[in-house]
Image (cartoon, helix red, strand yellow):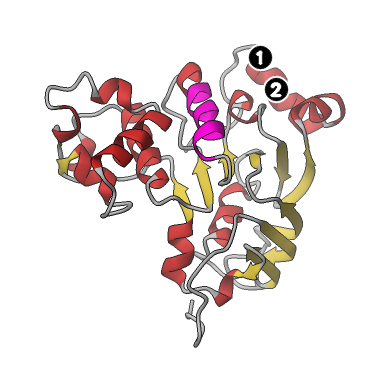
Amino acid sequence: LTDPEDPIMEVSDGRIDFNHVNFSYKHGSGKNALSDIDLHIKSGETIGVIGGTGSGKSSLVNLICRLYDVDEGSVCVGGVDVRKYDTEVLRNQVSVVLQKNTLFSGSILDNLRWGNPDATEEECMEACKAACADEFIDRMPEGYHTKIERGGANVSGGQKQRLCIARALLKKPKVLILDDSTSAVDTATDANIRAAFNTKIPGTTKIIIAQRVSSVQSADRILVLDEGRINAFDTHENLLKNNEIYQEIYNSQLEGSGDFDQPA
C-alpha cells in the first residue's frame, strides 16, 4: 500500500460508500473474498453486520481502514476514496476494535491514552463510562492508576474488550468498528454499551460485526453477508420477516443452541 503524493489529512464525516467492490486476497487471482459490494452508509448510522464464517465480514472492515486495496471499484469514507488519505489519518479516524485487542504493561490510564496521548483524565473516565468499563475500574485498588500486567493478564476477557473500546472512543473517530469485540461481555453489558454509544457518540458511524443477533438487532440497518456477497441490507424486523439466512441465525440462537459461528 502506498500513500498518495498529496494525501488528504482530514476525514470530514463518517459516510461510507462501497461502489461495486470486488476484492480477493490474491489480487484478482483466486476466489473473491468480496464480490460486487455496493453499499451506502450515512454518517452517524449504526450498522450491524452478520453472516457465517468466511462470509466476508472482516474483509469488509479491512477495506474501510485500508489494510488492503480493492481489486475493482472503490471504497470511500467521508466522500473520499480511502486511497487518497494519509494512511495514519484514515486509521485514526476509522477506529477498529478487534475481538482480541492488546493491552500492555502500565496503568489503565497509560493504556487508554495510547489511543489519544493528549486525553485528560476526565475524558478517559467519560470514555470508560461509555464502554461500561468504569464499573470494574472503580472497584480496583488504585482505580485508573491500577497497573495492568503485560498482555492484560490481570483483567478478564470482557474487561479487556471494554478497555479497548474506551481507548478507541478517545480517538474521537468518525467511524467506529467493533469486530466481534463484545463477544466476551454478557448480553446486558453489551446492550448498555450500545445504548451509551447512541448518547455519547451520536455523530460517529458505528459498525457492529457480531455473531449474536442480540448485538445487532437494535442497529438502524443490518447487513447480511453470504459467501462474500450482500444477501440483504435491512432492519431487524424486515429481515426477520423476509430473510432466510437471518431467520436461521435468529432461530438457532433463540433455542439457546449457542452461536452459529463459533470463533476459531
Rendering coords of residue 20 (x, y %): 77, 64
In this rendering, would 157 be left or right of 254?
Answer: left
> Which residue is pictured at 46% across the width and 50% down the height?
96
User: Residue pushed farthest right?
Assistant: 242
x and y percentages locating residue 68 in the rendered image? 53, 67
Relative side of 114 to 83, left or right: left
Quadrant in the rendering for residue 231: top right
User: How busy is the neighbourhood of tag 2: few (under 14 within 10 Å), some, or many (20 plus)?
Assistant: some
Q: Nearer the viewer, residue 2 or 229?
A: 2
**What separation in Å lies between label 1 and label 2 (alpha carbons)?**
6 Å
Say above or below: 136 vs 264: above
Query: Crowding near pointer 1: few (<14 within 10 Å), some, many (20+)?
Result: few
Picture quadrant where residue 77 is located? bottom right
Q: Is residue 252 magenta?
A: no
Q: What residue type is labelled 1?
A: Leu
Residue designated by label 2: 250
| Bounds of the magenta segment | 190-201
Q: Residue 132's spot in the image, x, y percent?
A: 39, 26
Residue pointed to by mark 1: 254
Q: What element carries label 1?
A: helix
Number of numbered callouts drawn: 2
SS category of the residue bearing label 2: helix
Q: Which residue is drawn at 66% across and 43% down?
A: 45
Q: Do the residues labelled 1 and 2 touch (CB within 8 Å)?
A: yes
